[in-house]
Amino acid sequence: MEKKYKNLVKPLIMRAGPEGLYPDMRIWMESKDFEGLPVHFSYGFIKEPCICHPTATIQDMLVHPYDEVLVFAPIDASGDILDLNAEISIDLGEENEEHVFYEPAAIVIPKGTPHGPVKVRKLEKPIAHYLVGLGPEYRAEVVPKKAATTMGLKYIRLIKPFRMARLCLSKKLAPPAAARLSIGGPGNADQIIWFFGDNLEDVKLNVSWGFYTSPGIWHRIGRGGAHVHPVDEALIFVGLDPNNLNYLGAQVEFALGEEGERHLIKVPTAVIAPRGLVHCPEITLWVDKPYGFIVLCLDAEHETTWLPPEE
Amino acid sequence: MTKKIKKYERFVKPLIVRMGPEGLYPDMRIWMESKDFEGLPVHFSYGFLKSAGIICHPIKSDEAIVHPYDEVLVFAGIDTKDITRLGGEVSIELGESPEEYVISEPTVVVVPRGTPHGPIRVRKLEMPIMHYLVGLSPEYKATTIAKKEKSTETKYAHLVKKFRSTPLPAYAERPGFMDERGVLHASKFVGPGNADQLIWIYGVDLELDLNISWGFYSQCGVWHRMPSGGAHVHPVDEALIFVGLDPNNLYYLGAQVEFDLGEEAERHIINVPTAVIAPRGLVHCPEITWWVDRPYGFIVLCLGAEHETHWLPTLTI
């Protein structure tokens, strides 16, 4: 039976991505792969020290005609979501400020800001790196650096450590029980960070990173967590095996539409939820290996209307 | 707003707590007859024996009862750490010249039609004992007879059966699935939402066209991890009975479980003690546990000596 919302369930595509941007194959999805959602997204692993974004030469920087967010995150779900165990630098601005960070972070690149390359200098174990570009497809101008590396602080505000995220549930930095999301079900994240627009230089985006290890429902509320948003979003299931981008490690049931049409997520997949489309319940049927999940929602806030329980 | 009627809603039966037949048990119990079970030709009762000294089935110690149908009386514990622990000592009298049998481990007493039996006595109790009965008749019927002198014979000993899983050949293919105590570890081998500990006894051991189970469930997720999501059919009728383990609240389940019925996988939500009736040939499952606040019990009551199952090749949802 052909499913009504099948077009909204998008297995992630692994490819090389734009030339000179990353050294390895990555998941690379643009608007045309995302049912017209006006963003592009890429996910992959950094397994050893490298230079990327761009790879070509450290004398060049990139400039995009849209806002971009670069996220560097751990993939060891048995550890803490706030531990990166790496040393990474990124050059920012015409002034070529070099900023070094040692903890998981989202880097906001406002449109027109020269940036790059990213230098992964030290790495104890593989990490995940994903980017969200707020343009339908990747576009970049390569510009030569105008200055030698400087140690300024003009752009430091663009480096957003995970611990500063509005929602931060980690092993070592857990909010008091009373402040936690009371609707979370057993299938939901064990550890999660979630940045909102006011955390991200007022970009119209809220974005998350979480570790998921357990079966069960994700939202213990109303009609099994069925809800709608007034904005578009992509809900992205990714694996944490740095040697296999096509492996998820779990099976999750995801319902779409008021009729609760059910879809099974078994491989890395993005579910597109256009504004106003009822989505969820999300129910994890089993987990073989912890997996990651990213909310990519196109507004500064994550306004949600939960459907009431069925009569 | 009008309530949306589901096609298979009539097969989902919240369990009814009531006194049951006069003189049979001293406490309120779950009591369901054929009319409550969509015509399944059985009756079923579930409850707890909560204190030492209780006499029941019947409550008069000088009487025995006789049913015109086969009956099965099940005694098991509610210690979710160890399903083989009964947590007390119970006796039952069997026969016109009653032979008394004392049980201190999970036990099934098979009472063939016409066999005088009772009462049951709770002799010692460390923790409440779960006791359910299955009568292979649409409704309860009994006559009472006066007892004769006790017998020291063991004519009825074969009717008192240790409640342990019937070892099926298929279990041998999965080392560790059944342990040496006859306990099945389904959550490790079948699906994460399935039983942590399960006892399932078949007709070959019960000497009846019946197979029944008792299990403890505490985990979330799908019950059968297979391409069909566990959707299957049987050539016989069955009831799938979700019960709580709180001896002081028979209305409490402690979990929420999705149970799908029909080829279209119509979703039903179980969050109170409930029997799902699966008539022969009706596709049922996936079963998916959404959350668990407290471990709960689950009973398969299947009207065949075996549990012949035909799994659908793929999930239809």
Image (cartoon, rainbow, N blue to C red):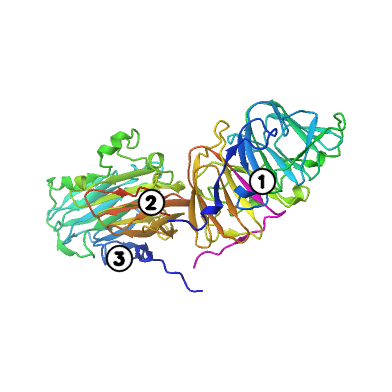
In what element is the residue under mark 3?
loop
Q: Is A129 situated above or below B275? A: above
Of residues A116 and A224, which is closer to you in this image? A116
In the rendered image, which residue does mark 1 sit on? A40
Q: What stretch is highlighted in magenta?
A: A293-311
In the drawing, does residue B246 fall left or right of residue A223? left
Query: Whole-percent x and y of residue B266?
Result: 41, 60
Q: What residue type is labelled 2?
A: Gly
Of residues B47 and B239, which is closer to you in this image? B239
Residue A169 seen by the camera: no
Q: Which amino acid does label 3 sit on?
A: Glu
Whether the magenta-drawn stretch holds residue A310 is answered as: yes
Output the chain of dot 1: A
Q: What residue type is labelled 1?
A: His
In the drawing, does residue B45 fall left or right of residue A149? left
Of labels 2 and 3, earlier in sequence is 3
The residue positioned 61% from the left and 57% from the top of the image is A274
Q: Is the magenta stretch mostly helix, strand or loop?
A: loop
The residue positioned 62% from the left and 30% from the top of the image is A126
Q: Is A81 situated above or below A2? A: above
Camera-side mark, 2 or 3? 3
Query: Whole-percent x and y of residue B310?
Result: 29, 49
Of residues B221 and B314, which is closer to you in this image? B314
Query: Whole-percent x and y of residue A81?
Result: 64, 38
Distance, label 2 to label 1, CA atoms, is 48 Å
In the rendered image, which residue does mark 3 sit on? B38
Q: Is A73 situated above or below B138? A: above
In the rendered image, which residue does mark 2 sit on? B297
